[in-house]
Image: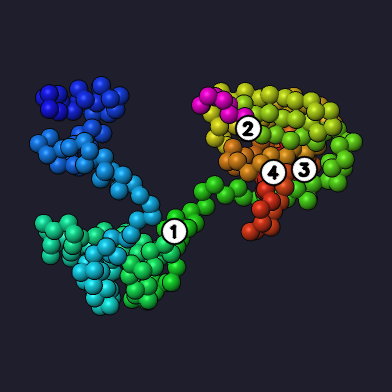
Amino acid sequence: MAAGESAGQLAKRLGRSPSTVSREIARDGGRDRYRAASADAIAYERGLRPKQARLAQRPALRALVEAKMALCWSPEQIAGWLRRQFPGDASMQISHEAIYLSLYDPRWRQAIDRSLTQRLRSARPMRRPKIARRPTGRGIIRGMVCITDRPAEVEDRKVPGHWEGDLVMGTRPSAVAALVERTSRYTVIVALPDGIKAEQVAPHLTRSLLGIPPQLRRTLTWDRDREMATRPSPPRPGCRSTSASCAVRGSAAPTRTPTGC
């Protein structure tokens, strides 16, 4: 910088993005005040962990936040009010997410009075992820059949005709389906040129299964991937759907989903 080089020229010499160099210069005083030694020391301090919460570092800000929460203000209202009340003072501003973290994150228990969670509209002592609130049904495969429902003859591998399958991903978007007969280990590779969505996989699996003699297609077991949300049409009446495993909710055992065979 002393030689008058631009941020782009410095970035090229350092092998970094120009935006990274520009942020570094602006963060530590700009072109007129930037000093490498002091910037390095500040970066070291900035990277130290664990860090104190913002409210723990600023008692005046903490007092304001606690006073507003005692009046049943939401963190969003408090953050907006602080921006309007102290427009040019960054030390007296905080995001609503930082307030929530101070309330709920166990690492920051000294940052704020945690009993103020009772003043929130939800009044919950623990925070719940937003995604977990409303199940949308996406990714759920309906009508699954547990592995315990497939014939006992499958387990000893003496009776041929029981298959297991899985999706094998290559360099996206290429993929194939692999079908393995449990007794003989005979393997069928099914090309999936149209994609890996359920409606794209089912026709190719159905066509491949129809090419297998009827006495050698008894059951087919698949995992819980979404490509089996739409199952292949059963090639013959009475063919069973099975699953590779079935776990009790909360257990660590894997679960699998059935397909028609």
- Residue 174 in the magenta stretch? The answer is yes
**Disc 4 versus disc 1: nearer the observer:** 1
Looking at the rendered structure, the kind of residue marked 2 is: Leu
For disc 1, the marked residue is 129
Q: Which residue is mark 2?
A: 167
Q: Check residue 118 in the rendering and tell me which mark sits there, or answer none.
A: none
Q: Is label 3 in a helix, a strand or a loop? A: strand
For marks 2 and 4, give the CA distance. 14 Å
Q: Nearer the viewer, mark 1 or mark 2?
A: 1
Q: Residue 169, image x and y in percent?
A: 58, 29
**Reading the chain from its start, which is encountered first: label 1 or label 2?**
1
Disc on the earlier residue, 4 or 3:
3
Q: Quadrant of the N terminus?
A: top left
Q: Contact (CB < 8 A) between labels 1 and 2?
A: no
Examine the rendering and report whether any part of residue 94 can be seen.
Answer: yes
Inter-mark Cα distance, 3 to 1: 39 Å
Using the numbered discs, state the Cα–Cα distance from disc 1 to disc 2 in whole angstroms: 31 Å
Q: Nearer the viewer, mark 2 or mark 4?
A: 2
**Which sits in the foreground, 186 or 79?**
79
Q: Is residue 210 visible?
A: no
Q: Which mark is residue 240?
A: 3
Name the spot of residue 192 as percent of width and height, x first: 59, 25
221 in magenta: no
Q: Position of residue 172 (x, y in %)?
A: 51, 26
Determine the CA span between mark 2 and mark 3.
20 Å
Q: Which residues are magenta?
A: 167-175
Report the front residue among 9 and 174.
9
Check the image and report above or below for 102 versus 244: below
Is label 4 in a helix, a strand or a loop?
Answer: strand
Q: Which residue is mark 4?
A: 258
**Residue 73 found in image quarter:** bottom left
